[in-house]
Each structure stands twice: as structure tokens, then as C-alpha cells.
Amino acid sequence: MKRASRLLASGLFAAVLSLRCGGGGGPAPATYTVTYDGNGNTGGTAPVDSKAYPTGHLVTVLGNIDALVKTGDTFAGWNTLSNGTGTAYAPGQTFPMGASNVTLYAVWTVAPNIVFVTSTAYAPGALGGLAGADSDCQARATAANLPGTYKAWLSTSGTDEVDAIARLGAASGWVRPDGKPFVDTIADLASGNILYPPRLDEFGNDLGQAMVVTATASDGSLSTTSVTCGNYTDTTDTGNILGGLSSAGSWLFTDYEAFPCATLAHLYCFQVDQVAAVSPTPVSGRRAFVTNGVFSSGGGPAVADALCASEASAAGLSGTFLAALATTTASARSRFDTTGAPWVRADGLALAPTAAALFTGEYTDVSLDMNADGTRRYDLWEVWSGAPGWDEVGTAAGTCSDYTSTAESSTAVIGLIGDTALTTLLDLGTDYCSTGTRLICLQE
């Protein structure tokens, strides 16, 4: 950007800014200034050029300058305010100078950073330290023609201790290789406010539920329960290193379970060049949520449905809501119309592109970890499912006898929110029927 500014200041401005002068005389001339400083993107403060013109002189605004911006950004026009919220001027637009000074700022559409999971798996103790891990990330990005500088999401310990989140610097706004937003800010990353899970590798292939080495806790800091395999140089370390799930749409992406230092696992690679903002595109559909309250077995599915209806009503939602539960005579899927609109969270993100796809895929597109009122759940919550799959009919031993038994020995199948893999969401294991557990609620 500084090179471009110097070029324009030294004469390029006169070549690309067309001016037509009216008659002489009149009020004192006003100053017309063009600067690249817009959206905080260039970092400099010197104007490209500044000249004084009498009232009535016609000024033709500078044309498209995409060729002069940094790779990935897009020139979006000119504006009278540096944040782009003032009066907009299109490239090539002509206007007469008035008595007041005019400054036009370039407005940029800033390219987001990219985050991906490496297609290659590595032994954590054989990465060659942080430098080696960063090199692996850069090599994978280069192989996929991804722009920018990449760092591995890893924390180190000892005298060289550094938290993974601190390694991202001032960067913000990450998307997956397919363009879907992963996370907006560092604060969102630290709280697990993930939008779409980071399941894709550098080529855009969906790796599903892959184990990724992190040694990093849910807030992005070094895990106090994890080794770092000699800061990624020792495969003989007998301790276990923390890893995350690439399929997680919550902080489980970094903090799930530990494994030995010689075990092969993938890396998260974060681009760190851009200060951008990303946001999802909401869609309309039927609401899906996880209950805030717990359902204790007894009374059957009707009591579970009543809890869903009560929380939907409290959140101001209309329509009929049922619990996504399998019974001994019916699957969870059979309780719902799969020809209607897709199910969406309170933030408008769809669990699957169609209603039918929710029940036929192995993964949801985003994690189902939001209450009816839009509260995002960052804690680990178990939910009743009754069967390992949406299409499966339950058993008496897996449904607390259709949710009527409260006996200490009775059990039901449970899942865990926060992951997009149905093997986790629906089939984590079993829990006792005497334990109150939450529900997945879907609008009919």
C-alpha cells in the first residue's frame, strides 16, 4: 500500500484523476483530497494527493484501484468517511466542487483469513517444535494455493510457554476453504463461539471427525492437564497430549481428549494476515433447540414434549415442538415431517440444507448447542436420544422403558451437544433414568 501511495503522490494521481475546470474567480478554492485510508486497512495516514479547486470545478473521482490493493482485498468505492458510512462516490463519478473541502477515502472489502485442518497427520512429538508445525501448515497451504501466512494452533510449555491463541496476534475473521465462516473474533474463539466446524482440509475436503493435536484448553491457553511432547520434539514422552475434534462446532474443537505423543493426528492451521470480520448468512426455517431445563424419566414422551413446548413458548416461538426421542415403537425421525423447511438454530444457521438431510447425513452442518432463546451453551450437556441414530427404533433398555421408568437400574441412550458428528450427538453412551437430562426439540 505504501508503494502505491508513493506512486500516486509522484504523478500517477494526475494521470488517473480527470479534472475539468470551470471559469475563474469566485470564492476561495476548496481542497479535494483522495486517500487510501479506509476501513483501517492500509495502516498509513498520508493522502494520495491533495489539490485546491474553485467552486464549480468538475472533479471525476478516481477509478477502480483493485490492482493497487493487497492480495485478496477488493476495492469497494469511495466514501466521505473513513469507516465507509458517509456519502458514497462511485469510481468515475463526476461532481462539482463546492466551497467546502472534500476528502474521499477508499473503502475496502477485506478478505478474511482461512483456517483448515491438515490433510496430513503427524506424530505430535515429531513436528520439530512450533517452527516445524508452522512450516507444515505453510507447506499444506502452498500445496492448495491458499494465500497468506499460517500458524499452527498449538501451545507450548516451560520457559518457552506460549498460548495458541496468542500466536494469532491481531488477526480476526476466519473462514474455511469453502468460504463458510468459522469464527469472527479472538474473543469468540476463546469462548467456543464457533459458527461452522473446521472440518475441511486445505483442499476443501471434509475430514469429518478427525483428531487434531492442540495441547490447548477451551479458552485458547496451554492446557494444564496436557503434555506438549517436549514442545513437539519428543515422541518418547510417556504423557498424553490434548487434542480436539475437527467436527466440533464448539470449544470441543480444541479440548476433547488426550492421546500418546507418538499417535498420528492432524493440525489446525490459521492464517494470520488479515483483520477482517465474518458473519453467517441466516436462513428461514423451523426452529431447533436444546432445552435449558432437564427431563427426568416418568410420564413418557408426552412429558418430554411438554418441556419443549414450554421453553418454546417462553422464548416467544409459535408452532408445535416435539422432543427428538426414539421409543420402542418409533424412531425419532418418524415424529417429524421431513418435507418441510429445514431446521435452524436461533441465529438462523441451518442444521442441514434440507429437513430430510438432517436425518440422512452423518453430520449436522452446525452444532446443536443453542437454547430456544438463542443462548449459546458452552458447557458440556448430555441429551436424551433413545437410540444411536435418527432412524433407529429404541429398546426398553435404551429408552427407560419409553421414558416411564425411574428405577435406578434403568438406562437410556444419550448424546453430547457441541459436536456435529451424530455419533457424538446421539450416541455417546447411556445414563441412568433417575438422572435428569436435556432434550433436543424440533418444530413440527
Image (tube, helix red, strand yellow):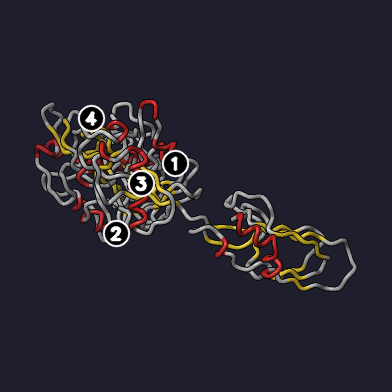
Observer-nearest residue: 288 or 168?
A: 168
* Mark-to-mark CA distance, 1 and 2: 36 Å
Question: Residue beneath label 2, please?
Answer: 354
Residue 24 placement, left or right of 200: right
| Disc 4 packing (10 Å; few <14; some 14–19; many ≥20) | some
Q: What element carries label 3?
A: helix
* Mark-to-mark CA distance, 4 and 2: 47 Å
Q: Is residue 210 visible?
A: yes
Q: Is mark 1 on a helix, strand or loop?
A: helix
Q: Are marks 3 and 4 in contact (CB under 8 Å)?
A: no
Name the amino acid type tagged 3.
Ser
Q: Which of marks 1 and 2 is nearer the N terminus?
A: 1
Name the amino acid type tagged 1.
Leu
Name the amino acid type tagged 4.
Asp
In the rendered image, the vertical position of residue 231 relative to residue 24, given as above or below: above
Q: Which of marks 3 and 4 is nearer the N terminus?
A: 3
Observer-nearest residue: 254 or 45?
A: 45
Q: Earlier in the sequence, mark 3 or mark 2?
A: 3
Observer-nearest residue: 196 or 142?
A: 142
